Image (cartoon, rainbow, N blue to C red):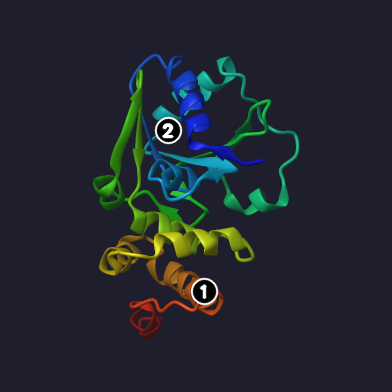
């Protein structure tokens, strides 16, 4: 099932009402695209926390908002390595990460600095990571997730490729991540026939 931005806004508002003190979250996937008007619907919401304290407070608020941990996890979510995964009665998923996403990508100070304030829901402050960081996140998602390649196509126009290149360098596992990202970019190029200006440079650095 797919959910639109209005539905997600209502869910965040309901969760925000149950959060007792300030918490910041960063949206790094399809919902961040939806809130920017780049995507009509999404299956889930990927939420990254900067610290364990914010994660713990948010997680407690989910129970009052009628979210629970699913007893089974669909195969498409198995490799995301979320700290916790929750869903509500509508089947809407929340994938929660603390500082790291996909066993690969770190929420770096540069990512935090580029993030844009979306909205505050009571004590819950929601920020959207940049288009460049979403593109990188999508490019490091599991192979075979064709919808991520389609999302990369939507994000492609107007990207600042130097930001993506610098963010890869800033990551702790830079060389390993670059190898994965290059492989995904080659797949992206094959599927969508679009040139990625930094691809050759990234390959030379491997």
At 35% across and 20% down in the image, what residue appears?
123
Badge 2 density bin: few <14, some 14–19, many ≥20, Cα 10 Å: few
Disc marking residue 192: 1
At 71% across and 51% down in the image, what residue appears?
75
- How far across and how far down the image is residue 180, in percent? 50, 70
Number of callouts: 2
Would residue 23 be visible to someone looking at this image?
no
Per the model, the C-alpha gap separating discs 1 and 2 is 39 Å
Q: Quadrant of residue 142?
A: bottom right
For the N terminus, give its image quadrant: top right
Mark closest to the chain's N terminus, 1 or 2: 2
- How far across and how far down the image is residue 86, in percent? 61, 32
Disc marking residue 52: 2
For the C terminus, give its image quadrant: bottom left
Quick check: 91 left or right of 140? right
Indicate whether 180 appears above or below 6.
below
Q: Between 4 and 87, which is closer to the camera in this rendering?
A: 4
Quick check: 114 left or right of 137? left
- How far across and how far down the image is residue 192, in percent? 51, 74
């Amino acid at each position: 099932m797919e959910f639109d931005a209005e539905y997600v806004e209502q869910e965040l508002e309901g969760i925000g009402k149950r959060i007792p003190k300030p918490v910041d979250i960063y949206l790094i996937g399809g919902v961040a695209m939806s809130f920017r008007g780049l995507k009509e619907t999404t299956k889930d919401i990927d939420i990254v926390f900067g610290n364990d304290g914010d994660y713990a407070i948010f997680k407690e608020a989910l129970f009052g908002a009628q979210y629970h941990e699913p007893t089974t996890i669909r195969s498409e979510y198995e490799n995301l390595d979320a700290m916790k995964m929750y869903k509500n009665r509508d089947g809407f998923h929340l994938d929660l990460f603390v500082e790291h996403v996909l066993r690969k990508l770190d929420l770096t100070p540069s990512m935090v600095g580029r993030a844009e304030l979306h909205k505050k829901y009571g004590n819950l402050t929601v920020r959207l990571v940049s288009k460049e960081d979403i593109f990188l996140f999508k490019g490091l998602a599991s192979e075979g997730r064709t919808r991520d390649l389609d999302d990369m196509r939507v994000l492609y126009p107007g990207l600042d490729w130097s930001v993506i290149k610098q963010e890869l360098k800033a990551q702790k596992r830079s060389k390993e991540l670059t190898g994965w990202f290059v492989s995904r970019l080659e797949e992206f190029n094959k599927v969508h026939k679009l040139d990625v200006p930094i691809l050759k440079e990234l390959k030379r650095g491997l």
